[in-house]
Amino acid sequence: MRLDLPYEQPRERPDTPAAPPLEPSPVERRREHLAERAGEHRGPKVATKRRAKNASAQSPRVAKRRSVADERSVERRPRRDDIPNQMVGVSLRDEERKILADVGRFRVVSTRDIAETIYGKQNPQMERDLGFLRQKGLVEVDAVNARRDGRGGKVERIEVVTLTRAGRNAARQVSELPQGQRLYAGLVKPREVEHDAQIYRAYGKEAEHIEQKGGTNLRVQLDFELKSQVQKAIYAERKADPEREMAEIKQQVAQQFELPYVNGGIQIPDARIQYDLDQGSRTGHEDIEVLTAAYSPGHLRAKAQAGFRTYASSSDRASITAKIEDDHRMMANILEL
């Protein structure tokens, strides 16, 4: 039996004190403590990541802008590499431009040859011009020992000129060089400096021969450049067909570069002189080699078979003659520097 009794809201007694809140249990206190620790660690980690991300995205750009602004505001002493950009205000004599062009093409040239070919043996003027170019940081002048080759007596010293990197850049700007002419800077292989310096002298003699038969616009390729081109061509052929015989590849590459193939190897000259004929309608080239007493008999014969235009100094001819005394025809083809 259900009885519906009236329901009455209990009235709050103002004079009755409120019941004290229940204290959390040890488990609840532990949970609250762990939650607080988690919140403390989570907050800094998020902020740190955001700061790191923002710093990685912004700081390099800011630093770069600052460094550029600092460089603009600070006056610096120009480096050698900056000098070519200032050549507008520097007046070079024709002889000085010729020095930059010739030394750049042949890497190293002796001061004796510069005095003879450019200055007509007027050494004082050459020394003044070289001093000016050195002051501008465009050339270096060094004294190196000549080759001994078993010769006795006092060691001869050779004074040679090379370009700095700034000088090489300046030569491209102020010298009227043929398009595609490669230039060099710095002194390499000091033991071969005497031989390398003689290439310039051999070029001078061969250039006269070329110009007499109508050659113009002479360009020079040193063995550095030729070897690099030949090696790249051989590598490309081997990569294309790894099973192909190396001798066949070398013969093809030698024919491609119009170089002689002698005794299983491609013969590369000290320098190749390219020139134009008939007002540029035809082209030709001459390969020159400087022989020295340091060459072995086999090396000498290989160069002779290659058909290069060979040159040797008077001091080296005696030693070369002794090494190939049984081949008089070969000696007759060696031109004197």
Image (tube, helix red, strand yellow):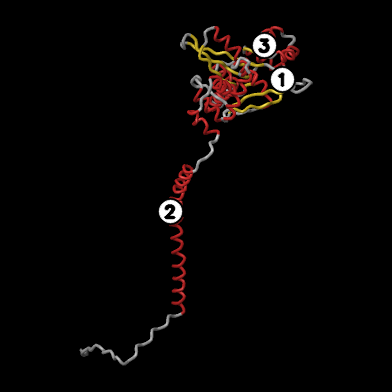
Pointer 1 or 2: first along the chain: 2
Name the image quarter holding the N terminus: bottom left
User: SS class of the residue under badge 2?
Assistant: helix
* Real-space CA distance between mark 3 and mark 1, rounded to the nearest whole angstrom: 17 Å
**Element class at badge 1:** loop
Q: What residue is disc 1 on?
A: 294
Precedes in sequence: disc 3 or disc 1: 1
**Position of residue 121 measured from the top left corner of the image (x, y, whole percent):** 63, 15
> Which three-letter amino acid code belongs to the residue tagged 3?
Glu
Question: Residue, x 44% and y 64% (percent of image)?
Answer: 43
Check disc 2 and report the residue beneath it.
54
User: Position of 40 compared to 17: left or right?
Assistant: right
Q: Point out the tag, 2 or 3, that comes first from the N-terminus.
A: 2
Q: CB under 8 Å between callouts 2 and 3?
A: no
Residue corresponding to mark 3 = 336
Residue 236 as seen in the image, left or right of residue 142: left
The residue shown at (65%, 19%) is 112
Image quarter of residue 296: top right
Q: Which of 59 and 236 is in front in this view?
A: 59
**Nearest the camera: 163 or 336?**
163
The reply, left or right, for residue 262 in relation to residue 9 is: right
Task: Find residue 12 and report its horizontal and vertical position in percent.
Answer: 28, 89
